[in-house]
Image (cartoon, helix red, strand yellow):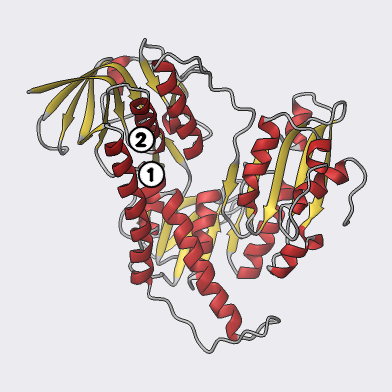
Amino acid sequence: MDIQHTTLLIIGGGPGGYVAAIRAAQLGIATTLVEGDQLGGTCLNVGCIPSKAMIHAADAYHQAHHFMGGSALGIHVESARIDIAQTVRWKDGIVARLTGGVGALLKKHGVKVIKGWAHIVDGKTVDVTLDHTAGPAVRIQGEHLLLATGSVELGLPGMPFGGRVISSTQALSPDSIPKKLVVVGGGYIGLELGLVYRKLGADVTVVEAQDRILPLYDEELTKPVSTSLRKLGLQVHLGSKVQGLNAAGDAVRVLDGAGREIEIPADQVLVAIGRAPHTHGWGLEKLMLAMQGRALKVDDQCRTSMRNVWAIGDLTGEPMLAHRAMAQGEMVAEIISGKRRHFAPAAIAAVCFTDPEIVVVGQSPVDAAKVGLDCISAHFPFAANGRAMTLEATDGFVRVVARRDNHRIVGWQAVGAGVSELSTAFSHSIEMGACLEDVAGTIHAHPTLGEAVQEAALRALGHALHV
């Protein structure tokens, strides 16, 4: 067996793993990255990027249909159709360019990339096979082992993926649009993809076990999304539990909130109930590392319970966000190079690309109250924002949360069209310890959606100008 040696050995080429590899190489650390599938991981290949591409395509198609009846803008469209195969090819082209770019960056920085499946031997040794059936092709020994294997989709017991039952990965590459789609799960993945299929012409029904959609977000933020779902004709069953497919396999059996079993016809069923750390099938158990639930337990430097074994990203639990994994990967590389670093962000933005979008950074008013902070909060509605009016997107608002005693900002939330792009401003203000006066006193460009950020701060201070 070929035996190779390196300083940093990384398992997983997703956002966390490849960023760690690039930064380590920049710092002069000999680095080997093992990835069995495609570079870029879930995010680039079957998650963040392709889903946003499909969301854009669905929005464009929906807009075309909207104009078929004429509009206040004076635009009239005679007809609209979609070639879903071409749409998928366009989406795949974006993914290919990005994953190819990751490969080029790794090569440019001198990272050794091995395409194969890693299996842990011990805390410093990994065997790599070129496929799941062949024996080990190479053994790699490293001084440091970085685990970045990401997460896997959760399935429903008694309703495995296959046939009519599809995963979010399959939903991103449809051969055709089903007439009737049932989505199991009213979280961000289920709603994002449910909206895509609805805008592409499917009759969509969402089944959610909890009593409201997007249960991780506060109800004030989710109300505009609920309104949008109703306008689009997307059906939602709350407080309902999926029991499985009926005998014929053409409907989903659901126990509703009143305890009655109903059947919802379905040509396809998308199961989108969440993801779990990818901990099985590659020998992780041999290391007997400390766990925290399903995730690996790490400290504020992403060290596991074994010396020189590190873990980042989804493998370490919530929040499962690509940008969190990237920041952790960069930090680990710098620590190994001798720099002093700790992972202690003031806040990490979370974005839900529904219609309208939701962005949350830091604490909500309820969060702040739970930890004993006396805070003030204020909204600014997009109905009073000129740019939102020109975009025909006046639903939603920006909300700021700040301490009452010193006006230091502890949280931002927004719901509306395009608010994902406000997340940077939100994160900056919290990370830099800004106060309401700092944001209120900063000149914001007009006309932009970002003016709502300044106006929310002004309103919290008691002197909003445009509402």
Q: Nearer the viewer, residue 453 or 304?
A: 453
Q: Which mark, by number, is residue 157?
A: none
| Horizontal relation, residue 185 to residue 382: left or right | left
Q: Amino acid at mark 2?
A: Tyr
Quadrant (top left, top right, bottom left, bottom right) of the N terminus? top left
Q: Position of residue 279 (x, y in %)?
A: 35, 29
Query: Outermost residue toward the top?
Result: 307
Residue 209 to residue 137: above or below: below
User: Which residue matches tag 2?
Assistant: 18
Q: Amino acid at mark 1?
A: Thr
Query: Outermost residue toward the bottom?
Result: 78
Query: Outermost residue toward the left?
Result: 1
Q: Nearer the viewer, residue 141 or 107?
A: 107
Task: Indicate the quadrant where residue 25 lies.
Answer: top left
Q: Which mark, by number, is residue 42?
A: 1
Instruction: Please tell me which residue is depicted at 38% across the width and 61% down the height of the picture.
Output: 91
